[in-house]
Image: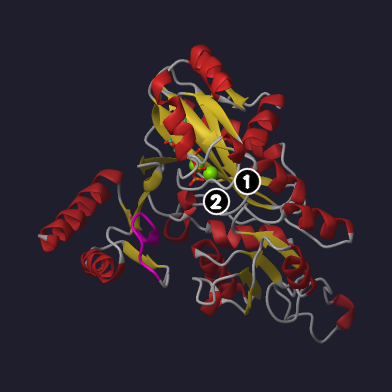
Amino acid sequence: FACHASQDDPSTRNDELPVHGLSEMIVGVLGGGQLGRMLCQAASKMAIKVMVLDPQENCPASSLSFHHMVGSFDDSATVEEFAKRCGVLTVEIEHVDVATLEKLEQQGVDCQPKASTIRIIQDKYMQKVHFSKHAIPLPEFMPIYDLEGAKRAGKLFGYPLMIKSRKLAYDGRGNAVAKSEEELPSAVDALGGFDRGLYVEKWAPFVKELAVIVARGRDNSISCYPVVETIHRDNICHIVKAPANVKWKIMERATEVAYKAVNTLEGAGVFAVELFLTSDDQILLNEVAPRPHNSGHHTIESCYTSQFEQHLRAVVGLPLGDTSMKTPAALMYNMLGEEEGEVGFHLAHQLIKRALTIPGATVHWYDKPEMRKQRKMGHITMVGPSLGNIERNIAVMIEEKELDHK
Ligand code: ATP
Ligand code: MG
Ligand code: MG
């Protein structure tokens, strides 16, 4: 990016280099939650302008964005109006009005990743069909339309049986487990009934959950981040350890599956591939997110290029950055709402106070207007010489917080 030397001689000036920020393109992001917020933070380093579309006036990304359009990313007219103002359209959530994105693409609007990718991913059943067609290893699955069908699936796959809603799932809110045939009706009811659109997955007896963030540039170059281990509590991401403590062979296999999966999807950006590791060292794909992801938050402090910077580089057409870690180890701890309202804020504050005294810890607070139980309110990333060292620090932080609570 040495553009100064050529200023005197216009003939040697590279016209592709932007005059102001690293890209003149305004990046439009559908959704203004914590992922949108962290995209804005990365964008500010590169002087890239990010506009967000989110219905909530004080959403986490609002105050950090170049512009916040208040409106629904699930409403056709609003998305069209928003798209007119952006150079490239991307997402921080997959539950958007994809039919409008497809229409806009036909009219020449630049969507990254492509609307076809969002369409496949936002319906988890369709996603599974897509990946199985491409020979990506998955837990067995089938659609269910009524109780008889659910019982047939139970006979075929055994129990516990994982029932999932095809659409609008996040943080496990579209999942219900039936431990036996008797539990099928209540599990289906908990998901809102068959009309919601359900499918089942065979239980994956995983020993660990892994994830790989894969970035693809506009030139189709692909780059993978180190494999991480994700630990969920009540279906919600709780802790991420980087790098994952698994054999080299497993790292390779996980990266290969993630690479292969993303290679079947169209468009630029970062993708998160959630994986199961089974006791016989198999890697199975759980799901893919077409955007920055909770399993990649640690990259802000631990990698040369954060997943957020990488996503922006990818969608505006800059070269992808180095995905390797610059610290030996990192651990990300999600701050989930423990109690509603003021009590919840107080508890989080106690934890943050502890974290601020620990070397290598960085606190991210998303500034969500309301504290709710189990809601992702912020996260803490700790970097250090080894996972063992960091885990000792985390233990101190959590214990202290619990002492304060008493
Ligand atoms: P996210 O917030 O990641 O989008 P989600 O709501 O889409 O989550 P999933 O990723 O499908 O939900 O599942 C959440 C968690 O439930 C997984 O991380 C895993 O711990 C568990 N899980 C999902 N599918 C299975 C399965 N087939 N067998 C066993 N456990 C599973
Ligand atoms: Mg999901
Ligand atoms: Mg998931």
Label 2 CB-ligand 1 distance < 8 A? no
Residues at marks 2 and 1, CA–CA distance in whole angstroms? 7 Å
Q: Position of residue 108 (x, y in %)?
A: 88, 61
Give the residue pinned by disc 2.
Answer: 323
Quarter of the image with the N terminus in it? bottom right
Categorize mark 1 by other alpha carbons within 10 Å: few (<14), some (14-19), many (20+). Answer: some
Secondary element type, mark 2: loop
Q: Residue at x 66, y 25 (%)?
A: 132
* Label 2–label 1 contact, CB within 8 A: yes
Residue that appears at 54% across and 18% down: 153
- Mark carried by residue 223: 1
| Residue 145 visible in the shown view | yes
Q: Residue at x 72, y 81 (%)?
A: 4
Could you tell me the amino acid type at mark 2? Answer: Thr
The answer to whether 114 appears left or right of 158 in the picture is right
Compared to 369, does 132 lie above or below?
above
Q: Earlier in the sequence, mark 2 or mark 1?
A: 1
Q: From which residue to which does the magenta span run?
A: 370-382
Q: Amino acid at mark 1?
A: Ser
